[in-house]
Image (tube, helix red, strand yellow):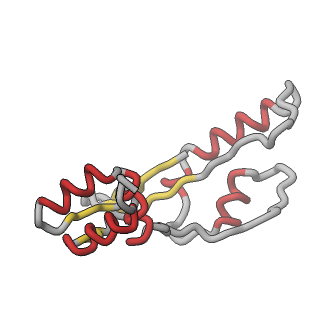
Amino acid sequence: MLGVLIGTDLVPLGSGGIVVQLLPDAVNDDASSPHWRTVSQRCRPLVRCLPLNSAPEEIAAQVFAGLDLSMIDKMDVAFNCECSKERFERALITLGRQELEQFARAAEPLETICHFCSKRYFFNVGHLEQLLRELGNPRE
């Protein structure tokens, strides 16, 4: 469940979500179905009823109230992108000699943008020519 808490001035105050799923090979029978429905229903209004600074343990305690709950792991969530100029170099090389030569002939820096984090990487003509040298001579 995902949700966004909107203030009276229509400005977002916070957002969050929770993923609840059965473990692999878990039995989803008539005995567990009512519990599963209850947990699903409790997830829906979470964004409206929890303080913005609620700890994950507090949220889990509310969602699973009355059920046997044990936390087996906890990890911080972070926005992290693994992009780098070197990764974009390798991606450019996969375009092949002909396309790299076209970029180099354009005589302008080539701009690449990571679609995950929006970081921009620039490759000048000299850098593109270096990548072409690394590809080697196609006639050899």
107 left or right of 53? left
Q: Position of residue 17 (x, y in %)?
A: 54, 53
Number of marks in the rendered image: 0
Q: Is residue 45 above or below residue 101?
A: above
* Res. 92 image quadrant: bottom left
47 left or right of 119? right
Q: Position of residue 82 (x, y in %)?
A: 49, 68
Q: Position of residue 114 (x, y in %)?
A: 35, 61
Q: Residue at x 68, y 46 (%)?
A: 20
* Res. 13 image quadrant: bottom left
Q: Residue at x 75, y 51 (%)?
A: 64
Q: Residue at x 38, y 64 (%)?
A: 88
Could you say which is closer to the camera, residue 2 or residue 134? 134
34 left or right of 82? right
Q: Is residue 26 above or below residue 96?
A: above
Could you say which is closer to the camera, residue 131 or residue 60? 131
Q: Is residue 36 above or below residue 89?
A: above
Q: Residue at x 72, y 67 (%)?
A: 74
* Res. 125 image quadrant: bottom left
Q: Quadrant of the C terminus?
A: bottom left
Could you say which is closer to the camera, residue 92 or residue 13? 92
Q: Quadrant of the N terminus?
A: top right
Looking at the image, the residue that sits furthest to the top is 30
